Every structure is written in structure tokens, then in C-alpha cells.
Amino acid sequence: MANKPDISYGNEEESSYVRKRLIAFNAEHVPENLSSRYEEINLTIKDDSGRVIGGLLSTLCWNWIEVEILWIEESLRGLGYGTHLLNQIERIAKEKDCTFIKLNTFSFQAPEFYVKNGYDEVAVFKEAPTGSNHYYFKKDIF
């Protein structure tokens, strides 16, 4: 490389271009029946007045679902709402022929909750952030 390339923060258009280029590259290496599978799947739980008290935000990509966020209002934690959301996304994963669900959480959140619900720890970054651990989990869908 003769000249150093110019590196700068990408704007929205440039970021979109980079994302599309990677998606096109990936599509060449994934079976055709999976290459266009991408869908956001977002679930919410509401109380009797319609107020959101919890939710699960996820993305279906190729043959898996990635849970990006699972949140339950603090006063309602431990009452089964989180498990109910996980059961629902697992049912959806089966319906959509996914083979696994993946997610990540921190030690100050609820890694033991995911273990209790049948998720296997596949990796942990220690001291990320400092004083905490960052866990990665997977559950196979049968």
C-alpha cells in the first residue's frame, strides 16, 4: 500500500453503503434459501391499562434469532414475565425453522436467568466493563 488511505467517521449514506456491500458479500456464501432472511421480531408485554411493562427486541437472520434486548419493569422482575417472553421467541424460532437463539448479557443483569431457561454460556469477556463480565449465550432449537 503506497499511500495511507483516508479514514474518517462515516455518515449515514456511507455507513449504509458499507452495510449493503457486506450483505451482498455474505449472500454469496450463504445458501440461497437463507440469504435474504432478515426480520425484526419485537414483543411487548402491557399491563391492563396498555402501558408497556416489558419487552424483547430481536432479529431473525439466516437460521437464528438474536435477542438484542430483554427488559422487564424492575418491580415486576422475578414474576415469570421474562420467561414468558423467552418462551414466545423460542416458539417463533421453531415456527420460522431457526436452529438456535443467541443473546448476550452482563453480570449485573441476569446471566443466571438465561441459564435457568436452558441457555448455554458460550463465551465470557471478563472485566467488560470494569468490575463486570459480559456473557454470550446460545440455545439450540429443536
Image: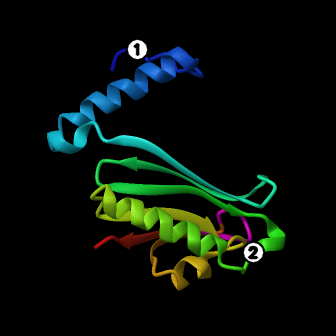
Find the magenta span and give its range. 128-135
In the image, farthest residue toward the front = 48
x and y percentages locating residue 52 in the rendered image: 75, 54
Mark 1 secondary-structure assignment: loop
Residue at 23% of width from left, 35% of height from top? 27
Residue 6 as seen in the image, left or right of residue 33: right
Query: In the drawing, what numbered circle is on residue 3?
Result: 1
Up/down of 74 relative to 80, above or below: above
Which quarter of the figure is the C terminus placed in? bottom left
x and y percentages locating residue 13 in the rendered image: 51, 15
As rendered, which of 120 and 42 lies closer to the eye? 42
Which quarter of the figure is the N terminus placed in? top left
Task: Give the residue pinned by disc 2.
Answer: 77
Spatial CA span between label 1 and label 2 = 56 Å
Q: Main secondary structure of the magenta part?
A: loop
As rendered, which of 2 and 8 lies closer to the eye? 8
x and y percentages locating residue 16 in the rendered image: 47, 22
- In this rendering, which labeled residue sits more in front, label 1 or label 2? 2
Up/down of 4 relative to 40, above or below: above
